[in-house]
Amino acid sequence: MKRVDDFRLKFGKQELVPIMVGGMGVDISTAELALETARLGGIGHISDAMVTDVSDRRFDTSFVKDKTKFYKYNIDNADKSGVKFDLGHVAEATRLHVGRTMEAKRGDGMVFVNCMEKLTMNAPADTLRVRLASSLDAGVDGITLSAGLHLGSFALMEDHPRFRDAKLGIIVSSVRALQLFLRKNARLNRLPDFVVIEGPLAGGHLGFGLDWAQYDLQTIVTEIAAWMKQENLDIPLIAAGGIFTGSDAVGFLENGAAAVQVATRFTVTDECGLPADTKQEYFKANEDDIEVNTVSPTGYPMRMLKSSPAIGSGIRPGCESYGYLLDGKGNCAYITAYNREIALHPDGKNISVMDKTCLCTHMRNFKCWTCGHYTYRLKDTSRRLDDGNYQMLSAEHVFKDYQFSVDHQIALPA
Ligand SMILES: Cc1cc2nc3c(=O)[nH]c(=O)nc-3n(C[C@H](O)[C@H](O)[C@H](O)COP(=O)(O)O)c2cc1C
């Protein structure tokens, strides 16, 4: 019976344990989690989502405070089009977050940055160019382009000295999205080094509509693998979404995938950035406590715990401090929904916004509890303590369980 450890992900001459821990913004996949994954020989991710805020917390900088002070005059203004990011600050924060993480890296694995195109930051191309370039400047091993189609992202990096040496990959959920990406980027003569295929059971934003349940990860992997063979393309495929045991992973490794990307099982580890009481919410969740909804202003469906405090919250939009979801004209679907409620309740008291959420503020405060479909199985991965809570796991324990387990067994902590 095969184990994940019988396989290796190959990048040229380098061989890795074929386990990638997926990016989880905002700072849910912390530097500690990514570093531990790399130490164990796999690939870990940090995320550059809301990097100015992450830098303030990690390094005591004051990017968010400074931005808030600068745009304070606009806080009560419904029009956010004038609220811009200082590109120098974005670069500095990215270099700090990524650079310090890379300096601390030990072991044979790698650390990548998860970069979401959907964080449009009121100047989509300019801010994305800076984010990508500063991650490369800071020595990151690779970048995973996520949440968005990213048709122009490779071109934004083409003049960077590391464009051909860093590992660059994309996340897709269909063969069509991959075909589109490759067609649009053909002139660059640079293929992605890896393609993550994310199925409908993943956490975070989904690349599917509300009919997500009709899709199946293995079917999409098989379809993409067959198309690539037909086109004589040799790019490692990385399957993601709902891979809960080492045996699940082996199933994909034997059927077209070169590695797996996993996340949910690491949400209940010491190294994960969620607060301890939130981790207990994840442990205790039952299947009917989880939903895929449309409250994210990005327009993508998102999976989360129904009890997330973000759902229905009517807080004032925090764009003067954050503003990561402002499109190129300074709009965000939450601002529209919030202003509609304000018009109905001019006193501004007890406002509830049901259809959209202020994702920046709530992700930043860990109040949007996004999670994978199998979160309800996390309780089977640990022991219940006398106080009713579950024992926290170490990332090493979970990583090694994926790496060495057979027969769908899940090792409980000592
Ligand atoms: C809490 C959480 C947050 C996530 N945030 C992001 C994100 O910011 N960007 C992204 O590309 N994927 C995100 N994901 C998706 C994961 O990176 C990963 O591909 C997926 O969840 C794997 O499926 P699994 O959770 O069933 O193992 C997130 C997943 C979780 C559980």
Image (cartoon, grey):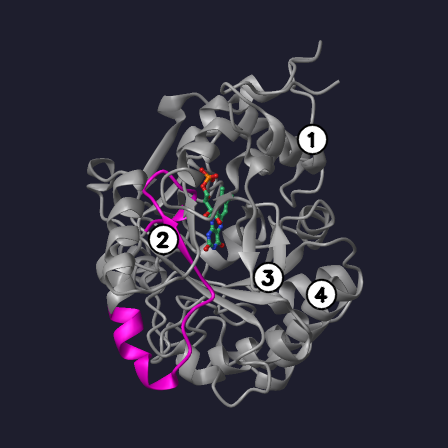
| SS of the residue under disc 3 | strand
Alpha carbon of mark 2 to alpha carbon of mark 3: how far?
25 Å
Identify the mark nearer the N-term, 2 or 3.
Answer: 3
On the image, which quarter does residue 188 sit in?
bottom left
Q: Which residue is mark 1?
A: 397
Which residue is disc 2 drawn over?
296
Q: Which residues are magenta?
A: 180-206
Between 170 and 13, the residue placed more toward the observer is: 13
Amino acid type, label 2: Ser
99 left or right of 218 in image: right
Q: Mark 2 vs mark 4: which is more N-terminal?
A: 4
Mark 4 or mark 3, which is nearer to you? 3
Residue at 36% x, 74% y: name it: 327
Can residue 305 be seen from the camera position used here? no
Identify the residue at horizontal 43%, vertical 43% (top origin): 203
Residue at image point 51% right, 37% down: 264
Q: Point out residue 265 in the picture as x, y percentages from the top left corner.
A: 55, 33
* Callout 4 amino acid: Asp
User: 10 Å neighbourhood of mark 4: few (<14), some, or many (≥20)?
Assistant: some
Earlier residue among tags 1 and 4:
4
Circle nearer the viewer, 2 or 3: 3
Q: Look at mark 3 in the image and give the residue it sits on.
A: 112
Question: Residue 201 or 332: which is nearer the viewer?
Answer: 201
Distance from Cα at disc 3 to Cα at disc 1: 21 Å
Q: Secondary structure at mark 4?
A: helix
Above or below residue 113? Residue 357 is above
- Left or right: 301 in relation to 242: left
Farthest residue, direction bottom: 159
